[in-house]
């Protein structure tokens, strides 16, 4: 056979094999790949569509394996890294503006550990968002802006930042229409069997006693249940058990009722470099709120039900979170958010965790960022690529 034809034939064969094998081989080599078969999406098909919709949608779903990969990549450096308060899932679409304030919300994965877990999580989220918006050329500068905010807050914990224009625009449109609000709450409540309602009502009694001890003005009827149901929302938390309760509040006037969300405390013991403590410890969530949120939600507490811990907080009338596809008219709006998040984490990472040695901890963390700046940015780029590749494999599976 002619040598040229033989080589051409081999190339065609290799290309054909290449079309068949790479997804399997790459899946085995990609630490961020999660198979569809490891989760039951049948009860929540909308979740599967959100995960498939974009690399960032997939990224939101893989927080545990992503954070573990951060642990692996910075293993040597983390030996001497200080233990800080961690948000645990600091991505761009966790940023929200509410009646209480603004900033990163959703502290389900809070714990303590190396600040790089949050820094890398937000950095990759930012790069994926820029990719989604067609602003890839801006991603490096925006990450610098994030780290600048983080380090400025480390140097000056009293730093005050102007409200980003996106948050100000959303806040200006806030309205209080309690009839419409409670109608919406009713629409997202999924029915529960009467037997489970009775079990849950009994299980939350210790939580109620704690809330009444904190505030004696919460009388005997304050926590009377008006309506109750399952809740299936979110991406990273969509498969967790969640309940939503409407309770009576201070008076019998239905317009001053309060809505409580009760969320299963997620097992985050798969992340080796954090201090998760008990794998379902509810206090890690409450402390994350108290130390990192600009303004924590009200009615924070916990209870035990069905061999699980649940943490509780009350909702507000107005809550608007970032949607990468819709929120930003230009890069500058994104830049303001990015800087604000950097400041929030720079303050929150060290808040109350090392008193009276806060100054030493802030200086040590800033020194850590400074000495590893280039590697942090390199790993951020590599983790972005791994995420995109894993999402592609997820679609091909």
Image: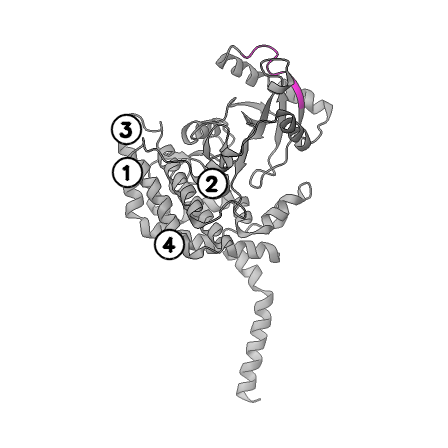
Mark nearest the camera among 2 and 1 is: 2
Residue 41 showing in the rendered view:
no
Whether pointer 4 and pointer 3 mark residues with C-beta atoms closer than 8 Å, the reply is no
Callout 3 crowding tier (Cα within 10 Å): few <14, some 14–19, many ≥20:
few
Of residues 116 and 309, which is closer to you in this image? 116
* Sequence-wise first label, 2 or 4: 2
Residue 159 showing in the rendered view:
yes
Q: Which residues are magenta?
A: 218-227
Distance in Å between CA atoms under marks 2 and 4:
29 Å
Q: Which mark is residue 364?
A: 1
Above or below, 18 relative to 211: below
Callout 2 crowding tier (Cα within 10 Å): few <14, some 14–19, many ≥20:
some
The image position of residue 190, as x and y in percent, is 69, 31
Whether pointer 2 and pointer 1 mark residues with C-beta atoms closer than 8 Å, the reply is no
Is 23 in the magenta? no
- 198 on left or right of 218: right
Distance in Å between CA atoms under marks 4 and 3:
31 Å
Label 2 belongs to which residue? 166
View extreme (right): residue: 194
View extreme (front): residue: 172
- 145 on left or right of 248: left
Label 3 belongs to which residue? 357
Judged from the image, the secondary structure of the residue bearing numbered disc 2 is helix
Q: Which mark is residue 378?
A: 4
Distance in Å between CA atoms under marks 2 and 1:
33 Å
Distance in Å between CA atoms under marks 1 and 3:
11 Å
Judged from the image, the secondary structure of the residue bearing numbered disc 4 is helix
Is 220 in the magenta? yes
The image position of residue 82, as x and y in percent, is 33, 37
């Amino acid at each position: 056979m002619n040598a040229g034809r033989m080589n051409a034939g081999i190339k065609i064969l290799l290309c054909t094999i290449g079309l068949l094998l790479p997804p399997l081989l790459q899946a085995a080599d990609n630490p961020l790949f999660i198979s569809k078969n490891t989760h039951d999406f049948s009860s929540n098909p909308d979740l599967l569509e959100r995960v498939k919709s974009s690399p960032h949608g997939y990224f939101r779903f893989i927080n545990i394996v992503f954070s573990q990969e951060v642990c692996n990549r910075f293993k040597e450096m983390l030996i001497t890294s200080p233990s800080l308060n961690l948000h645990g899932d600091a991505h761009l679409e966790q940023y929200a503006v509410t009646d209480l304030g603004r900033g990163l919300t959703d502290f389900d994965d809070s714990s303590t550990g190396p600040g790089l877990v949050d820094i890398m999580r937000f950095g990759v989220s930012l790069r994926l968002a820029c990719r989604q918006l067609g602003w890839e050329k801006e991603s490096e500068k925006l990450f610098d802006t994030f780290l600048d905010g983080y380090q400025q807050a480390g140097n000056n914990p009293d730093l005050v930042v102007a409200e980003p224009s996106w948050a100000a625009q959303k806040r200006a449109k806030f309205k209080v229409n309690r009839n419409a609000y409670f109608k919406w709450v009713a629409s997202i409540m999924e029915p529960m069997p009467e037997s489970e309602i009775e079990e849950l009502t009994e299980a939350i009694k210790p939580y109620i006693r704690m809330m009444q001890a904190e505030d004696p003005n919460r009388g005997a009827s304050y926590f009377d249940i008006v309506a109750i149901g399952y809740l299936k929302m979110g991406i990273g938390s969509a498969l967790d058990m969640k309940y939503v309760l409407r309770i009576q509040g201070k008076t019998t006037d239905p317009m001053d009722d309060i809505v409580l969300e009760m969320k299963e405390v997620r097992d985050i013991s798969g992340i080796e470099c954090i201090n998760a403590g008990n794998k379902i410890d509810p206090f890690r969530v409450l402390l994350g709120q108290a130390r990192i949120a600009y303004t924590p939600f009200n009615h924070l507490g916990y209870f035990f039900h069905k061999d699980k811990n649940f943490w509780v907080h009350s909702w507000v009338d107005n809550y608007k979170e970032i949607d990468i596809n819709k929120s930003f008219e230009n890069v500058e709006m994104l830049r303001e958010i990015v800087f604000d998040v950097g400041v929030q984490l720079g303050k929150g990472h060290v808040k109350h965790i090392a008193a009276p040695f806060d100054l030493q901890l802030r200086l040590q963390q800033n020194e850590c960022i400074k000495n590893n700046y280039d590697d942090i940015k390199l790993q951020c780029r590599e983790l972005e690529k791994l995420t995109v590749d894993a999402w592609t494999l997820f679609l091909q599976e």
